[in-house]
């Protein structure tokens, strides 16, 4: 049996945040049960499920904690019914503060969920309001404590930097307050202004590039001192607590996505589900995007180099039956010459001090030379 990551998309939110362009909605609640019926149908009718053993499951969104726990439990039962699930399977649910109580967390635990990913974003009340978040720092604190009391020993929290009117000092306060919670994993994402979001229509006073760089460098240094190792550009973990599910994406491992707009990568092929919730409910089939070997080689490098472990040359040649230098030799040389890429013990990785500016490097691997 092959290992598999399972992603389940829950597109419901209490309110849209001002920066969010995810496939999530606050005005479709009347379809909650119908959506979960369709989701469960998709899971139990999954062809070829017998050849896989799920070793990570991720229930994301949207705000999965905002739907009735019964629906989350139904999804988990459908997964257990259709797939083999590894004993040590990492099973994550994304939660937002003030949308789930202690009893809800206990029900998630009883359904086998063993990891919570919670959005804090900022510890500053004004910034939370500006972002359009529905919670306060106090709400986060009580949800975090409820999750711990319910037995969650593996909690991740999300933060954002580069916010409107944010100073380096404000970010430092958010980070140090966030670290006090003692989460096992912390993600720090730079705010990006996406098209068609409320933020894209506002005049915002955003920190300049130098300030954002300073914020990022502070996070790497500060979290490092608190025992969090950066293992991907935006992700920091205590020992043994990396997100195994997200590592699958960066390693180009196989995963199956269920729900509106969810993507799968199976047998070297990508599939995308219908993004419209209503069309998904009425049974619109997924689309297969045929990717060439060249596309996959680029993705393998582009995704793997985001992580501190980088890519193994032997993995590349096993997967593509080609030597990495025969495909990316000139690009690798270019960045080795300026000291941005290192090759050591059969692995290729971006030097830690270049990770922040790695986007331009990564883009170079998208066009095969
Ligand atoms: S809670 Fe998350 S998914 Fe929902 S609108 Fe806010 S950022 Fe987007």
Image (cartoon, rainbow, N blue to C red):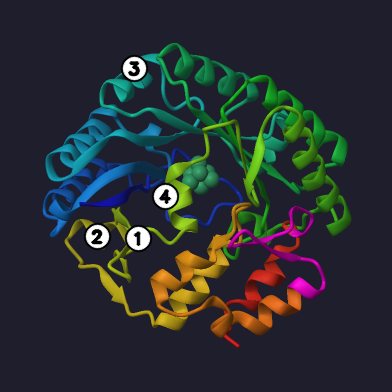
> What is the crowding at mark 4: few (fewer than 14 residues within 10 Å), some, or many (at least 20)?
some
Q: Earlier in the sequence, mark 4 or mark 1?
A: 4
Residue nearest the viewer, comparing 32 with 235: 235
Q: Is residue 237 left or right of residue 100?
A: right
Say which of marks 4 and 1 sits in front: 1
Range covered by the magenta-colored residues: 336-354
Q: Earlier in the sequence, mark 1 or mark 3?
A: 3
Say which of marks 4 and 3 sits in front: 3
369 lies above or below 236: below
Q: Residue at x 78, y 33 (%)?
A: 222
Q: What residue would you read off at disc 1?
A: 261
Real-space CA distance between mark 4 and mark 1, rounded to the nearest whole angstrom = 13 Å
Q: What residue would you read off at disc 4?
A: 25
**Is label 2 in a helix, a strand or a loop?**
helix
Residue nearest the viewer, comparing 45 with 260: 45
Q: What residue would you read off at disc 3?
A: 106
Instruction: Mark 4 and mark 3 in contact? Answer it, CB < 8 Å.
Output: no
226 lies above or below 352: above
């Amino acid at each position: 049996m092959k290992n598999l990551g399972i992603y389940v998309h829950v597109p419901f939110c209490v309110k849209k945040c001002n920066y969010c362009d995810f496939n999530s909605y606050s005005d479709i609640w009347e379809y909650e049960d119908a959506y979960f019926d369709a989701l469960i149908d998709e899971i139990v009718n999954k062809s070829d499920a017998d050849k896989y053993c799920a070793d990570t499951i991720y229930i994301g969104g949207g705000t999965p904690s905002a739907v009735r726990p019964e629906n989350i439990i139904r999804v988990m039962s459908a997964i257990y019914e259709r797939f083999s699930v590894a004993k040590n399977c990492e099973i994550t649910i994304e939660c937002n503060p003030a949308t789930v109580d202690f009893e809800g967390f206990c029900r998630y635990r009883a359904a086998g969920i063993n990891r919570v990913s919670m959005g804090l974003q900022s510890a500053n009340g004004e910034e939370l309001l500006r972002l359009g978040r529905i919670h306060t720092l106090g709400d986060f604190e009580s949800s975090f404590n409820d999750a711990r009391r319910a037995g969650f020993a593996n909690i991740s929290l999300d933060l954002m930097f580069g916010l409107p009117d944010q100073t380096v000092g404000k970010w430092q306060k958010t980070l140090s307050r966030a670290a006090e919670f003692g989460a096992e994993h912390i993600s720090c994402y730079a705010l990006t202004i996406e098209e068609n979001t409320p933020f894209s229509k506002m005049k915002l006073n955003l920190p300049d590039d130098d300030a954002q760089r300073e914020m990022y460098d502070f996070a790497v240094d500060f979290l490092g001192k608190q025992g969090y190792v950066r293992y991907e550009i935006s992700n920091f973990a205590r020992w043994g607590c990396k997100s195994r599910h997200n590592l699958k994406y960066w390693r180009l491992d196989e995963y199956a996505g269920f729900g509106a707009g969810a993507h799968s990568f199976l047998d070297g092929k990508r599939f995308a589900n219908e993004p419209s919730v209503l069309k998904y409910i009425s049974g619109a089939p997924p689309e297969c995007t045929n990717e060439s070997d060249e596309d996959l080689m680029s993705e393998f490098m582009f995704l793997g180099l985001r992580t501190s472990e980088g890519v193994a040359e032997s993995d590349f040649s096993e997967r593509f039956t080609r030597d990495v230098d025969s495909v990316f030799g000139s690009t690798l040389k270019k960045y080795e010459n300026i000291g941005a890429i290192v090759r050591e013990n059969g692995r290729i990785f971006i030097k830690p001090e270049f990770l922040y500016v790695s986007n331009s490097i990564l883009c170079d691997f998208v066009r095969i030379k």
